[in-house]
Image (cartoon, rainbow, N blue to C red):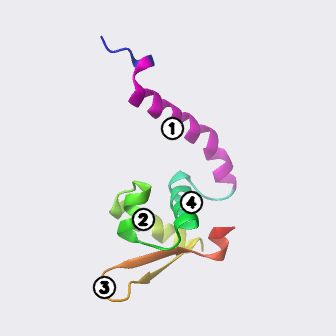
């Protein structure tokens, strides 16, 4: 019989949920949520990314990321621009405010 207290995927999920629960109030004081923090963390460490790359690195669905990026742009946390050779590509980067 499977015992949840010894099942690694279950324990990892529980740990993640506890982290989010503890971290959310601090993020809210800064006007961001956990998904925004994930995007900003990746951009801070890895630099600007295409929307597709950012989706993969943050595990945020591309359509969800697109809506999230819109809200983050309105808050001045990120900037978006069309990719050079591929007009369909969108490059996302932190702004100075987002880097703070």
Q: Is residue 49 magenta?
A: no
* Circle nearer the N terminus (4, 3): 4
* Residue 16 - label: 1
Residue drawn at x 62%, y 69% is: 98
Q: Position of residue 51 (x, y in %)?
A: 39, 70
Residue 86: assigned label: 3
Of residues 41 and 25, the one nearer the viewer is 41
Residue lying at 32% horizontally and 15% vertically, measured from the top left: 2
Disc 2 designates what residue? 54
Most prominent secondary structure in the magenta stretch? helix
Decide: few, some or many residues near mark 2? Use Cα within 10 Å; few <14, some 14-19, many ≥20: many
Establish if 88 lies above or below 22: below
Q: Give the x, y percent position of residue 8.
A: 41, 27
Question: Mark 1 and 3 residues: CB-CB less than 8 Å, in contact?
Answer: no
Query: Which class describes the residues within 10 Å of circle 3: few (<14), some (14-19), or many (20+)?
Result: few
Residue 85 versus residue 13 in the image, above or below: below
């Amino acid at each position: 019989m499977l015992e949840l207290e010894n099942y690694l995927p279950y324990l990892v999920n529980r740990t993640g949920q506890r982290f989010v629960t503890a971290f959310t109030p601090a993020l809210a004081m800064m006007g961001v949520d956990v998904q925004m923090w994930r995007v900003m963390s990746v951009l801070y460490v890895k630099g600007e990314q295409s929307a597709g790359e950012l989706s993969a690195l943050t595990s945020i669905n591309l359509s969800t990321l697109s809506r999230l990026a819109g809200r983050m742009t309105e808050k001045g946390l990120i900037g978006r621009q069309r990719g050079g050779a591929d007009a369909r590509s969108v490059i996302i980067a932190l702004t100075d405010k987002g880097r703070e």
